[in-house]
Amino acid sequence: MCTEKQNDAEADNRRLVELYTEIAVLAGGLAHEIKNPLSTIRLNLQLLAEDFTDAKSSRDKRALQKIQTLESSCQRLQDILDDFLRFSRIGVESLPLAACDLNVVVQEMIDFTLAQAAELGIELVSYLDPNLPAVELDRELFNQALLNLVLNAQNAMPAGGQIVLQTQREGDRARLDVIDNGVGMDADTQAKIFRPFFSTRGEGSGLGLPTTRKIIEAHDGTISVQSERGKGTRFTILLPVVAEPARAAPTPAAS
């Protein structure tokens, strides 16, 4: 009886995966079809703007302003489509995983974002467990997820602050915390932040954190959030560690 239920559950999971894959492929194809005419519109707007570069009359200046507004809207659409294509591809194919030192990945991200953070009055601090086991990552994809979290933390600190990145082992998992002392979130916002297209900011596609979650889950990991208004936010990532090879039993000494 249990075996039949397990088989039914596995069949349902396969159908869901197939359905999701089909929807993702269709959505990706649609996004590509939109991008092509959008690129043509942007190019023609750029050429049109060049004709009004030396605008002197009020009428020409108004025309140039309207063209620039359209260019800005096209760029926003382009960014949303690019984010959506990234989001739709994740999980469709298996990731090319390789054993990595998570501490090295985190330190590289700190080095990459250090200058920008300093300009915003933000201090980056790391506490990295030197005995952390290796994890299997698609480095490029995981870097995107981690960058999304760091940028999200920066956006939460308009007046500056501190971002802490901390690693440690937690059972058979490697734990990575990204902590900020920014504006924080209420419970309602926390419940929605991983929903596609949800955003608390006027700009952006609302796909940054949903993409991050999909990337983490594609690595068989989990991501959770704890936050409090006025005090800050903690994102916690848990990733399975690479199994350590079994040690061979000592050979008994010859008598």
Image (cartoon, rainbow, N blue to C red):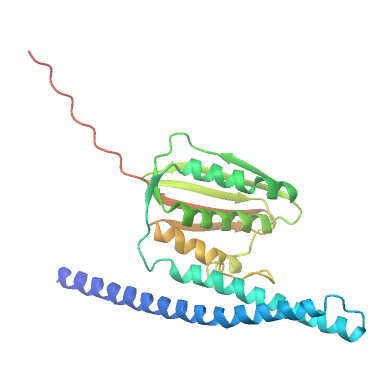
If the image is split into quadrants, where does the C terminus sit? top left
Front one among 225 and 85: 85
Percent x, y of residue 108:
55, 44
- Residue extending furthest toward the left: 255
What percent of the width, then of the height, locates residue 157?
Answer: 71, 55
Is residue 103 in sight in this rendering? yes
Apparent side of residue 101 relative to residue 187 in the rendered image (left or right)? left
Residue 68 percent location from the top left of the image: 76, 77
| Residue 39 quadrant | bottom right
**Residue 121 in sight:** no
- State the count of labels: 0
Determine the residue located farthest toward the bottom in the rendered image: 59
- Residue that appears at 46% across and 44% down: 102
- Asked if residue 248 lies left or right of residue 139, the reply is left
**Which residue occupies the foreground of this view, 63 or 107?**
63
The answer to whether 1 is drawn above or below residue 160 in the figure is below
Q: In the orientation shown, which residue stands out farthest toward the right?
A: 57
Residue drawn at x 65%, y 82% is 41
User: Quarter of the image containing the N terminus?
Assistant: bottom left
Q: Residue at 57% of width from left, 47% of height from top?
A: 109
Tell me: residue 248, above or below residue 109. Answer: above
Query: Where, by quadrant of the figure, is residue 193 drawn?
Result: bottom right
- Give the residue at x 59% y 70%: 206
- Residue 216, above or below 193: above
